Each structure stands twice: as structure tokens, then as C-alpha cells.
Amino acid sequence: MKILVVLVVVLGLACSFLSCASDIVLDPPPSLVGSYTGWYIYTNQATGVQKTQTITWLFTDQTYNMQVDFDNEGLTDFCICETFGKYSLEDRVRLDQNGSGPPGGTLCDACNDAAVSPVGLFLLDRTTDTLKLVQVESGIRKDIKLLRVPDVVTK
């Protein structure tokens, strides 16, 4: 009986080492944490109407915050809601909005329909110095193009 138990234990250990030998271990995706400036582009592919707004964006470890950039040239009359929420990063980025509201400047008193807000699953492209998030659903394309703002070093 002892021989049978020892044999089962040895066989179990051998199988666990052999089965793990060919496993592929992937590194976690690089962090998005940081401050960014860029553009939010909303395109209705059926009509060809495209609206662009300059934005600032902040990623923390688990949250994001998008605001209209009133200090940047290129501000348009496209009034988007400023949004904040949680995000998750895997091979794509999922934005889960916790809240939104009109921007704090003089551009508009209210913001567009919530469907215009960047929410849901976005493809992630970091092949250049611009962080690109892209979502295409039901003929609507949402592009977020972000450039990292250098960290300010104080003495």
C-alpha cells in the first residue's frame, strides 16, 4: 500500500513539472499611469460627420479622468462630457464610467448625449509615442489619441 501511495505522489509531481515546462508566461502589459494631453475624436461612419475635442487625461493605478482642455489650441464647439471612472488593462482597455458632467469652462452649459462618452472596450496601440485607444461599434468610431505630459521635477 505504501508503495502505491509513493508511486502516485511521484507520478503526480512528475506530471506537474512536465505540464508546466511548456507553459508560456506573459509579462503584464506596461502601465498607463500618468498625465496626458490629446484629442478625443467621435466619428459617425454612416454620415461621415467627425467631431474633435482637445482633452487632458489622467490614468492612476485603477482610475481615469478625462477633461476638456481649455488651454490648448484646437478647441472646437464639440461639447463633450468630462468623464471619470475605473479602467482595466489587458490586451485592450476597458473604460467603466462612474460619472460625467459638463466641462467647467465657457464652452457649453451642458454636454452631448452620454453615448458620445468614451465607455467600453478599446483597442490599445502603443507603437508610436502617441497612446491610441480605438473603439468601433455600430458605425460609431471613437478615437482617443494621447501624448504623455512629462513629469515635473521640483528641487
Image (tube, grey):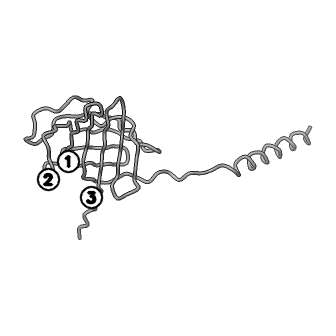
**Distance from Cα at disc 3 to Cα at disc 2:** 16 Å
Q: Secondary structure at mark 2?
A: loop
Q: Earlier in the sequence, mark 3 or mark 2?
A: 2
Callout 1 crowding tier (Cα within 10 Å): few <14, some 14–19, many ≥20: many
| CB-based contact (under 8 Å), mark 2 and mark 1 | yes
Give x and y (percent) for residue 65.
27, 43
> Which residue position is annotated with label 1?
54
Q: Earlier in the sequence, mark 2 or mark 1?
A: 1
Q: Nearer the viewer, mark 1 or mark 3?
A: 1
Identified by mark 1, the residue type is Thr
> Which residue position is annotated with label 2?
73
Q: Residue furthest front?
A: 47
Quadrant containing the C terminus in the rendered view: bottom left
Q: Is residue 66 left or right of residue 75?
A: right
> Which residue position is annotated with label 3?
149
Q: Is residue 92 left or right of residue 69?
A: right
Identified by mark 2, the residue type is Glu
Q: Is residue 88 left or right of residue 40?
A: right
Q: Secondary structure at mark 1?
A: strand
Q: Secondary structure at mark 3?
A: loop
Residue at image coords 87%, 43%: 7
- Residue 108 occupies quadrant: top left
Residue at image coords 27%, 39%: 84
Residue at image coords 16%, 35%: 102
* Figure label count: 3
| CB-based contact (under 8 Å), mark 1 and mark 3 | no
